[in-house]
Amino acid sequence: MARNRITVVLSQAQGKHPAKRALEESVVAALLMEPGVEVSVVPYLYDLGPDHTGRMFLESVRGDMVLLSWLFPRAAFWILDRDGIKGHWGESQLKSPHADAEDDEAKVPEPPKGIGALDVPNRHIYALDMRDFNNHEVYVEEVRRIAAECRERNEKKQKATTPAVPASLVQLGLVTHDEPPAPTRLFEPEQMLQAPAGRRWYPVIDYSRCTNCMECIDFCLFGVYGVNGEERILVENQDNCKKGCPACSRVCPEQAIIFPDYKTAAIAGAPIGAIANLKIDLSKLFGGSEKDAVSQAVLERDRELVAVGRDAVGTAVGLAKRQSHHGAKPKDDLDSLIDALDSLDI
Amino acid sequence: MTEPLTFMMGKFPAPLQANRRYCKNHMWCQTTDGVLRFGFTTYAVRLMQDVYFLDWEINEGDTIALKQKIGHIETSKAMSDLFAPTTGTLVRFNPELLNDPSAINVDMYGNGWLFEIAGSDAETISMNDYHAFLEAGWEKTQNMLKGHM
Ligand code: SF4
Ligand code: SF4
């Protein structure tokens, strides 16, 4: 039955890294043999523009979905959300090998403190990080587990709704949305794999952390951020963002702004709980002259302003509110890591 | 001749070599055939552990300025941008590391050298001063590492 199938989408790595391609191919080959799994391949998710067939395909998927990508799961999930491909966060059981096993039980998922995503349909999206293992079997196993988990969840949902619904409607009422169109027939694989127009660079907001404080919109002088009708912060003009510049992510008091392609894990969307186990950035120790995060952001912003022929503004613009209301909340791991790096004044 | 010093990173020894100068970015510096050769100190290598990737962003022959960002390193435990230890002209990178950076772990004071620069060693410090510099920074470094691990 189509609705019991799970859609797995593999988002390719940027470039043509042979080892990455090989892993992608073996994962896809193995998943093609899996019953109940619909597998498709699209290019690097972050680069997909709205007209790309791969993106349209992703938009067409209605049920539960697993996304395999070379991105941190948090980054992948919120890129999808940004593209209007929404769902509930599906928790993968794949633990990054960089995480220490002993620490795992101690990690209680933190309660969401952000404003959350809008209009989340009744389905789950699981994001798996292809950088964690170089063995396809691990991913296939996890897809099986997720497929079973989704089946169970959907059966429960179905039981809960069945009695109230007349028998003739049951079949249509199982899923919250229309029966998914058979996606493979609508989208030719070759089209889906067309190379994206180019690399893109823009902030991605993690609404599970974002508190709508508006620091970012005040700070960015390139008009990237905006608000919607309900005064919710959003990335409005993503193409105005300056390539390579992660300035506003340093200013966000909640570390809610992700630049998926940035070199340091904390900004690229590393998992919050596991952040402590990720690679440490020793740049300061090895002679980097960065000071605290805000000064760094101010420098980066000035560089971009000057690059487009505008005047540098230093700390004069967009920082006023910051110190006043920050600092009262308990810090989580990501906050402490960033503070630790900041305080290391060598 | 000066006795080599060893800095204790907690219970882990980080031996220094007596016959060379040091830089505050945890590189050693030695004048060989009129150029300055640089490499990581044991202190740096202990913090990073196994080197996986080493990337240079400049080319041989380029003029570089002190503290200019010149590359990036990724190891089993860490990653870092790399910065020029002095001003000068980059003569060459250690060709052996370009394919396989593991010599940095095996022989950081010898075959694991990083690059050679034609320039002045005015920015370098003596082994004793470097040792004192490590002592002075050790608590902060530990706090950072603890905050992280
Ligand atoms: S600064 Fe961060 S928390 Fe504040 S509105 Fe922007 S993204 Fe949200
Ligand atoms: S990175 Fe710079 S240009 Fe881009 S949104 Fe942030 S502050 Fe604006």
Image: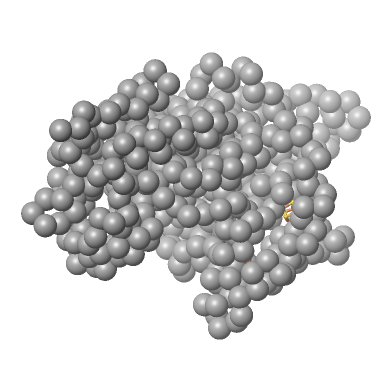
Q: Is residue A126 visible?
A: no
Identify the residue at horizontal 58%, vertical 45% (top origin): A342
Please say if A201 is above or below B72: below
A304 or A70, nearer to the observer = A304
Identify the residue at horizontal 78%, vertical 62% (top origin): A320
A266 or A9, nearer to the observer = A266
Is A331 placed left or right of A140 in the picture? right
Is A140 placed left or right of A103 in the picture? left
Name the outermost residue toward the right. Answer: A164
Identify the residue at horizontal 51%, vertical 31% (top origin): B139
A146 or B12, nearer to the observer = B12
Q: Quadrant of residue A31?
A: top left
Name the outermost residue toward the front. Answer: B1
Q: Quadrant of residue A25?
A: top left
Q: Quadrant of the N terminus of chain A?
A: top right
What x and y, as percent, mark residue A243? Answer: 51, 66
